[in-house]
Amino acid sequence: QVQLVESGGGSVQAGGSMRLSCVASGHTSSIDCMGWFRQAPGKEREGVAAFGSGDATHYADFAQGRFTISQDRSKNTLYLQMNSLKPEDTAMYFCAAHRNPFHCIHVVVTGRGEFDYRGQGTQVTVSS
């Protein structure tokens, strides 16, 4: 089993920045990709960004140029740096992982599919 714990959420004004972290523990050697997705009340889940095979990355259109996904394997930690935040970025942000190296990017691109593992989420609120 793999446990994912997110942190770093909170409230920020529009135009501000925030960095989310996700620490993975447990059987982390089984993970072949990781990513972030978000869900706002009354809205469908959206893929935000993900790592895939060979450290390839993919971003949703709304995240491109504003968000950066990174990882520190020595700390089993995934990050999401979010800049130029907008009120529409307000959502619960979840860290997720999968055993298929292509699956995380697939979810970001298509918005479909489930992850093998996901965290409890961290709330991001952007005020105008």
Image (cartoon, rainbow, N blue to C red):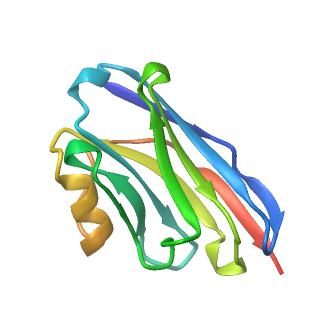
- Pick the front one: 87 or 119: 87
Q: Residue at x 29, y 45 (%)?
A: 55
Q: Residue at x 50, y 63 (%)?
A: 38
Reply above or below: 119 against 10. Answer: above
Percent x, y for residue 7?
64, 40
- Pick the front one: 37 or 1: 37
Reply above or below: 99 against 2. Answer: below
In the picture, measured across the screen, residue 103 lies left or right of residue 37, that is left
- Pick the front one: 3 or 81: 81
Q: Quadrant of the C terminus?
A: bottom right
Percent x, y for residue 108?
32, 66
Percent x, y for residue 1?
29, 24
Q: Residue at x 24, y 69 (%)?
A: 112
Q: Residue at x 17, y 52 (%)?
A: 102
In the picture, measured across the screen, residue 59 lies left or right of residue 115, that is right
Reply above or below: 105 against 78. Answer: below
